[in-house]
Image: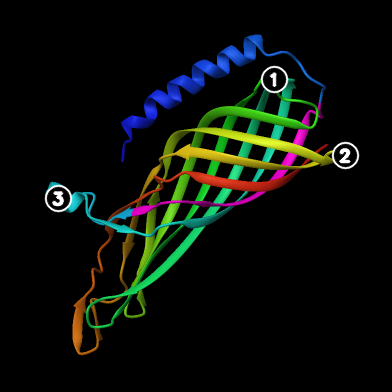
Amino acid sequence: MKHPRRMPLISALLRGCLFLLLFSPAYAQRGEHSISLFGGFVDDAQIFLFPQSPDPIARQQTADVGASFTGAVSWRYRFIPTLSAELRAEYLSHDSESSDVVGTPVVQGFRIAMFEGSALFSLPFSTKRFEMYVGGGIGLYSGRRLYSIAGIESEHVSSIPAVGIHVLVGAEYLFAGNLGVRGEVIFRDPQMGVENRFPQPSVTSHGITYPLQTTPFRSNINLNGNVYSLGLFVYL
């Protein structure tokens, strides 16, 4: 799902990054390499249930799964005091269970792996211990959907990875030698295609028989929320 309102923000950040790279003063040099471990959450995610339907209303039907917790590890290399590059691997997992009107349990969820590369630009008021930065880059996103009805789990058939861009703002503070804490907010909007199928044609629960689709059916997982991360890092 596209979010046009974010485009002016992305454009402004890119222009600001170029300005900072050219005109920011150098401050005390940190180490060139650093490794971070992050924990955080995505504040919203959706599963589009019928993305290939000819009905435009059905194509917009979603299962909202809400906030999801995430974990990440990153490696960062500083080229000059104001410019760094970062590689980030992140894993996101979420399950949510609900019941229909007769009490039959339905589980919706996903597992998503993300790999991103970013360019980061330090803001001019950064110091030896405290640094603020902005940046952005490109990422590869792949996922699988979790979906079960009355305890019958659908099987994962295939995934269609997504490629997307992201922007971020962050800050870090060195509190003991080369050890510090980082906090980041990441703006991204990937949408991944997945296919599932059920291993049997129906299931009965509470006296009701539910038909199940045994041929592959398509869903789209959309991470359209902001990512809030906090973690520790060390300069090597």
Q: Nearer the viewer, residue 114 or 167?
A: 167
Q: Amino acid at mark 2?
A: Gly
Q: Say which residue label 3 marks.
A: 57
Task: Point out the tag, 2 or 1, that comes first from the N-terminus.
Answer: 1
Q: Position of residue 101 (x, y in %)?
A: 22, 78
Q: Are marks 2 and 3 in contact (CB under 8 Å)?
A: no
Q: Position of residue 62 (x, y in %)?
A: 27, 56
Task: Point out the tag, 2 or 3, that comes first from the N-terminus.
Answer: 3
Q: Amino acid at mark 3?
A: Ile
Q: Say which residue label 2 marks.
A: 177
Displayed quadrant of residue 86: top right
Circle 3 sits in a helix, a strand or a loop, which is it?
helix
> Going by the image, does 199 lie left or right of 182?
left
Q: Residue furthest right?
A: 177
Circle 1 sits in a helix, a strand or a loop, which is it?
loop
At x 67% / y 14%, what residue is drawn?
A: 24
Circle 2 sits in a helix, a strand or a loop, which is it?
loop
Secondary structure mainly formed by the magenta segment: strand
Residues rendered magenta in the picture? 30-46
The N terminus appears in which quarter of the rendering? top left
Task: Point out the tag, 3 or 1, that comes first from the N-terminus.
Answer: 3
At x 58% / y 30%, what residue is drawn?
A: 118
